[in-house]
Amino acid sequence: MPSRTPDATRGVPPRRATAEFWPALAAVAIVAFLCTAYFPGALSFDAAYQWWQARSGETSDIQAPGLMLLFRLVEPVWPGPAMPFLIHLTLFAAGLWLIAGAATRRRLPAMALVLVTGLAPMSVALLGHVWSDVGLLAALVFTAGALLRHARDGGRGWLIAAAFAAAYAALCRHNAAPALLPLALYATWIHARRAGRARFVPLGLAVFAVLTAGAGLATRLLAREHYSALPGLALWDLAAISVETRELVMPLDTIGPGLSVEELDVAYVPWANVPLFERTRSGVRNPYAVPWPEADIVALRRAWAGAVIAHPGAWLRHRLRVTAALLGNRDPAWPEMLSFVDAETGYRDNPPVELNHGAVHGAVMAILRDWRCGPLLAPWPYLLIGLLALPVAWHRCRSPVGALALTLIASAFLYAAPLPVIAPSAELRYLGWSCVACLLGAGLALTVKAEPAAPRYATPRPLP
């Protein structure tokens, strides 16, 4: 009887047509539902601005260039947000299919993994938007799926597909690096298992460095105007310290004549920094209007550091309020745009885009508005699920499926950790990847069974 070579990674079931069909069917159903509900995709101001950059060539690095490049690529074929919306949705659904089909050959768990992740309230609320955050989310889900397929089937095709998806993810957000690091290490761990190499961490760090450095260089080269993220965050911190201490600590060249703490009382909110630049009579210098000279940024950095050192309690309480706004339930008085945008926003000479007015869209938006201030559209339950699943994933990380579960949860928390300090607002989309990754990681942790350790880096032997 001729020998057959088993999968090079233990614990992953072999390819079977039935194992592929059912999660594929579930993924197609998700795409069909979200297309019906959202097509051609909701367009917020940020996305409209990136579309205009792609059309005009007047680029800046206020936002990472990934979505702008995608707009530029598809504009000759299908102008507008429809094509990026479909590409993101396809990447996301294909990634779920790849993960579920490789994780288990049991029909119900595979379909449940796809449907629960794809139709979770957080996923439904975010995937209808043409956002760089959604591009990051979709690309990372596809990257994870391609890597798990490589673990099961081998071959370079899946590795190449994962590399392209990871590169797009790196270009979608300035802060994508923490999310990418665990996936880079997972990729090289899989490669080490298949190739019988004992050292994978240096290679994983090298892959991570290439991705992040390449994305940073591309961002720098593609932008005609360069902005610093510091002014927007520093002015927000300084306004919060001024309001709490009743002492104006903002540099004079950043505020209008006669600005008072009482004006800042009205303008400062813990859920976004933009109202600070719009709600005062005297005015606060807008960091997003024109690029700041380097000397002004240095002076502001010194003022900001000095105020934080002088008033650490006020700064910490402000950051705790931002953290609560990011992670917790939304206040009904806060703008709806912190959770989702039901609009096709115009910008300059962008062609008009018609909003989806279908019955399914109306029903979905009505449900999301009912849930907007509850736990289903708050990040904390999803992060809690990931935290509770972490010990299970750790216990089962000897298999590629269990290791991917651990990887996704680690990626989720590494990505979320800096946000309370660097996020300019408490928008739900900033934690979209963390929420979906925790949900998907928990599902994978429950899918795979614990198994004894395989010989480290052993080359698989044929079965009789």
Image (spheres, rainbow, N blue to C red):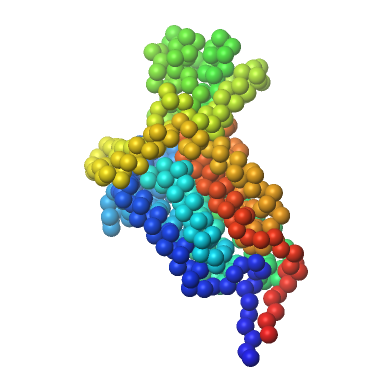
In this view, 203 is above or below 228:
below
Residue in front for this viewpoint, 439 or 456: 439
Please name the residue shown 63% across and 91% down the image: 1
For the point 46% across and 31% down, the residue is 373
Q: Which quadrant holds residue 310? A: top right
154 is higher (above) or lower (below) than 63? below
Report if residue 44 is visible in the image.
no
Q: Residue at horizontal 65%, vertical 44%?
A: 388
Place of residue 132 in the rendered image (x, y in percent of width and height, measured from the top left):
43, 45
Task: Between residue 285 and residue 330, name the one nearer to us.
Answer: 330
Give residue 153's position: percent from left, percent from top: 57, 72
Q: Is residue 352 above or below residue 289?
A: below
Left of 77 or right of it: where is 315? right
Left or right: residue 34 versus residue 250 is: left
Query: Residue 206, how many percent across, how many down?
Result: 63, 57
Q: Quadrant of the C terminus?
A: bottom right
